[in-house]
Image (cartoon, helix red, strand yellow):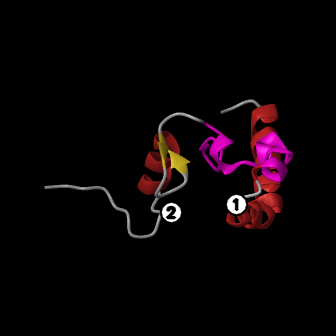
Amino acid sequence: MAKKSKIVKDRRQRELVAKYADLRRELKAKGDYVALAKLPRNSSPVRLHNRDLYDGRPHGYMRKFGMSRLNFRLYAHDGKIPGVHKASW
């Protein structure tokens, strides 16, 4: 599990990206790069890093499910992810 400070930082950064999304879109459409540069640095979606929704793990992230490979395996075996089941042949 990731440190609580990293999880809180990631949540706060995602809120900042959502807050400035419309303004960033307008400024980019106008081509006003001076005003765009004055926005907070962490409001850029490029600076986000994918983390597991449950424990904040940054590695082994599966984008389709929004979780790390470890939690994916755990929840898939418990049958908590719809449409996913263990393969057998």
Q: Secondary structure at mark 2?
A: loop
x then y, percent, for residue 42: 78, 42
State left or right for residue 23 relative to residue 1.
right
Give the quarter of the image for residue 38: top right
Question: What residue is disc 1 on?
Answer: 28
The residue range painted magenta reads 34-57
State left or right for residue 79 relative to residue 5.
left
Q: Residue at x 24, y 56 (%)?
A: 87
Q: Secondary structure at mark 1?
A: helix
Q: Residue at x 48, y 63 (%)?
A: 81
Give whichever of 43, 64 is nearer the camera.
Answer: 43
x then y, percent, for residue 28: 70, 60
**Front position among marks 1 and 2:** 1
Specify which label sits upstream in the sequence, 1 or 2. 1
Residue 52 painted magenta: yes
> Can you say which quadrant of the picture contains the C terminus?
bottom left
In the picture as drawn, the residue positioned furthest to the left comes out as 89
Give whichever of 86, 4 is nearer the camera.
Answer: 4
Of the numbered discs in the image, which one, if any, rests on residue 43? Answer: none
Question: What residue is disc 2 on?
Answer: 80
Report the number of numbered marks. 2
Give whichever of 49, 62 is nearer the camera.
Answer: 49
Q: Residue at x 50, y 54 (%)?
A: 75
Residue 78 painted magenta: no
Looking at numbered disc 2 in the image, what kind of residue is underneath it? Lys
Looking at numbered disc 1 in the image, what kind of residue is underneath it? Lys
Packing grade of label 1 (10 A; few <14, some 14-19, many >=20) is few
Rendered view: 38 above or below 3: below
